[in-house]
Amino acid sequence: MTNFTRRSFTSALALGVAAPAFLRNASAQSPTIKIGQVVPITGPAAEAGKYAMAGAKIALDEINKKGGILGKQVEIITEDDQTTNPGAVLAFSKLATNPEIVAFVTSIRSTQVHAMAPDIAKIAKPTMFGGTDPTLTKLGNPWLFRCRPNDTFSGKVIAEFGVKELGLKKWGIVHSTDAFGTNGMKALEASLLALGVTPVAIQGYANQSQDFTPVVLALKQAGIDIISSYFTFENDLGIFARQLRQLGVNAPWVGSPSIVNTTAIKLAGPALNNTYGVADYAEESSPEAKAFADSYRAMMKVAPDNQSSWTYDGMHLLALAFNKAGKTDPDAVRAAMLSIKGYKGAEGEYNFDANGDGLHGYNVVKNVGGKIEFAKHIEFPA
Amino acid sequence: MDIVFQLLFQGIGIGSVYALVALGFVLIFRATNVVNFAQGEFSMVAAFLMVIFSVDLEWPYWISFLLSLGGMAIYGALFNLGVYFPLRHRTYLPVIISTIGASILVSNSTLALYGPQPQVLQPLLDFPGFNIGTVYLDAQYLLIIGVTVVLVAFQYWFFEHTLLGKKLQATSQDKEMASLLGIPVATMIMLTFVYSAMIGGLAGIMVAPILFVSIHMGGTIALKAFAATIIGGFGDVAGAIIGGLALGVIETFGAAYVSVPYKDGFAFLVLVAFLVFRPQGIFGERVAEKA
């Protein structure tokens, strides 16, 4: 320590400042191409995390079978986000310190993507995510690429379907008070206002609630004739659905994607019969979606949902962008990603816009006795 | 008015769950002078046992129920031997840390063994509930309220009118004196853990058809139950029941008439208010004196 001079301190500082630039390109020497995945292995979303890993794994096997990325085999390195924001930040930081990782597949939860966004901007490598909060691609962070349609579209589709197809005007909106739920609600409210409809009741709730009686009674009192919802966790959705029906509210319900996912249907059972959901992933919506469903069923023995389809697409889009760029240089990969047009994934057709949004439409599906039936696809221009 | 009754019913229903778990807290606190932070996991473990027996193995509901409660008795005994007994001569702090450690260990072990998927447990009764006027009475909540009333009555009879109950009371009041009088203190504490695990387990099994079975199901309930014991008066059985019920009702009405997102906030606002203005709770001694 006695030899630690001002010069060596300055050199160390300069090295520290320059290190990220070296780290960004250190992957060129690695025998495999490594992609980091931030995923909930523990915590309330651990179930969904399992599906997300399966989707990525199916894509990984397909990519490697076709020769990998830039002629190298691909491998995924996972870190547990513990279903919390600090956990997600920690998991991402751990992956970011590995210079061999060239890109990331992160979270389906908007609040976690918000938490990780500053670190993603700092490490400056392509990052796929599934959170649907519309503001995420407007943060000015050039490294975020969304593999699901954002909630501007879900809000628009829910509003269009409810007002024009079902002809209902007295809307009640139930939403989680986290980033996903609140921004989803705002987008839906704006879409409804654009159609000349003002919601009669908007009810927020904190995640992991045990009782929704006050929410249901408020909807009842407001005299709603249609419900729309933005639920983050399936167990909340399950409890709400049951209490809604028990307390005699049988109005049509058009929910955000969580209403049609496998866990929600299992937990809520018949309480979700005849509900509509906007679904970014619907098995019958395209041959690509069907092919993914077949591979997923063979591996997991359950029906796939959006928890796995977006990671599947995310991996394929990364492979496509890297191979198109011809190198691992992040700027070149970013340009290649943004130039992807007409790529048919499991979620739909990807046409990246300048913000990094890949998809611009939603499917409307109906829960018929626990089985999800495809109703229609509504697409908006990119 | 119907809305008030509906909220009251729901509040008492969820409050009964808090009360049952709070009862488990209080019994262990009285016997050992420490708060068992793994009390919520008692509920979670019992609900998972129920899923294993009645859903996975498809055994009849009543047999599964009895086996799960039996399992909880064994679990309570093992918990005592592993978490409390080795530290019984130490101050309260290492024991509290030990229970927190046990809580983390148990929930993560359950996750590793059983996976993260929330499970559905069918309710005991076939009919879901009925209406009185426009007020809907959920059968499972009615059952929970009924079981709480019966348990409270049983507990009163047991502690006041049986020799074993009196020995347990004596142990909780003064261990040295009880020991001098020939009461096997270690056995009494063991029995307290067994009984507390069974009550916590019962609460878990009763609430599982409503809240689903997941490793997180015990966490929030235990936190509310802990608040209930402080509101009621730490160490007081009647206080735990009143505290639990009050908390359930306050948070339900608070959510309905003030704000739904801050529902959990009301519970803890009441807790803070009690700690500031009446730290001994409704019935009990001051927490500071006990600690």
Image (cartoon, coloured by chain):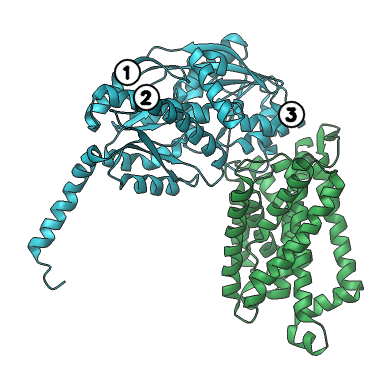
| Chain B painted colour | green
Kind of element beneath mark 1: loop
Q: Amino acid at mark 3?
A: Arg
Q: Earlier in the sequence, mark 3 or mark 2?
A: 3
| Chain A painted colour | cyan
Up-down relation of residue A249 to residue B175 (above or below):
above
Eye-nearest disc, 3 or 1: 1
| Residue bearing mark 2 | A317
Quadrant position of the C terminus of chain B in the picture: bottom right
| Residue bearing mark 3 | A245
Crowd tier of the residue under label 1, counting other residues whose Cα lies within 10 Å: few below 14, some 14–19, many 20 or above: some
Q: Is the C-beta separation of discs 2 and 1 under 8 Å?
A: yes
What is the CA distance from the residue labelled 3 to the residue labelled 2?
42 Å
Spot the residue most to the left: A7
Does B247 sit left or right of A77 as displayed?
right
Q: Is the C-beta separation of discs 3 and 1 under 8 Å?
A: no
Find residue B25 and report its horizontal and vertical position in percent: 70, 64
